[in-house]
Amino acid sequence: MATTTSRTSCWLFQRRQLDNISIVFAEMIATAMLMFLGCMGCVQNAVIINSNFQGSLNFGFVVLICIQCFGCVCGAHLNPAVTLAQYIYNMISLPMALAYFVAQMVGAFIGYGLLKAVLPDSAIYSSDTPNGVCITALNSTLTSWQGVTVEFLITCVLIAICCGVWDPRNAKNTDSVAVRFGLAISCLSLTAGQLTGASMNPARSFAPAVWNGAWENHWIYWVGPMAGALVSSLVYKYVFRSRENDDLENEETTLSTKRNSEADLA
């Protein structure tokens, strides 16, 4: 009996580990897809015509695709700021949040590297993008602190959308999540794209900076989004999230734990 229980526990542990590996791998692929397709849609030179409107729509559609493909596997965070918010919202453990962060950074690096591998230098560097395509740069009319404030505020909006989707009261309205996030990204990019690049995502800004060595004002794209995620998720969690739903979730978790314990004893 003890041997059977031990084998079952070992199998469940191995299965859980494989599931976690699958989740992290999916997050890496999804973030690579975001960078490859999203930044390809930002190419602009003498031959390829582009605009902030086109790039904003493109990034929104790419986010839609990533969520539709991998949302059921890993949630398709694509963004360390979203992962931080989900950790604060008690939806993910700290070790898993760190694994997501690594997957996002590696995926972004791979995705942008693949873009540089398949496109000619004339597409990566041009008079319109002298430091490299998809570099998030601060508009010359803004100060650094104005830039970080813009990134902070638009990330607050993005995370508020995430928290609204995660809210248990919205559990039955998840069929159009990919469309909602895609349109939200397009809207925020249209709004702030010409001011800061509307990054809202440290991984999205980090990969092009690494590949092109463009680090001017790079701190803005870490401090703004991460601070925005922290503040927005905390406010939503403690001001807007229903306590009744939290109590129901805790009761369901307790009942589930008891059932599993009884099954193990049996």
Image: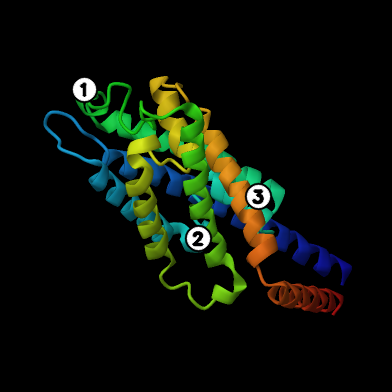
Image quadrant occupied by the N terminus: bottom right
Task: Say which quarter of the image contains residue 46.
Answer: top left
Disc on the earlier residue, 3 or 2: 3
**Label ID, residue 127:** 1
* Element carrying mark 1: loop
Q: Amino acid at mark 2?
A: Ile
Q: Amino acid at mark 3?
A: Met
Q: Amino acid at mark 1?
A: Ser
> How dense is the environment of label 2, judged by Cα within 10 Å: few (below 14), some, or many (20 and up)?
some
* Element carrying mark 3: helix
Question: Residue 76 in the image: x percent, y percent?
Answer: 49, 55
Q: Which residue in the protein does label 2 denote?
A: 161
Up the image or down, 5 lies above or below 66; here it is below
Q: Are marks 3 and 1 in contact (CB under 8 Å)?
A: no
Q: Is residue 251 left or right of residue 161?
A: right
* Residue 147 visible in the displayed image: yes
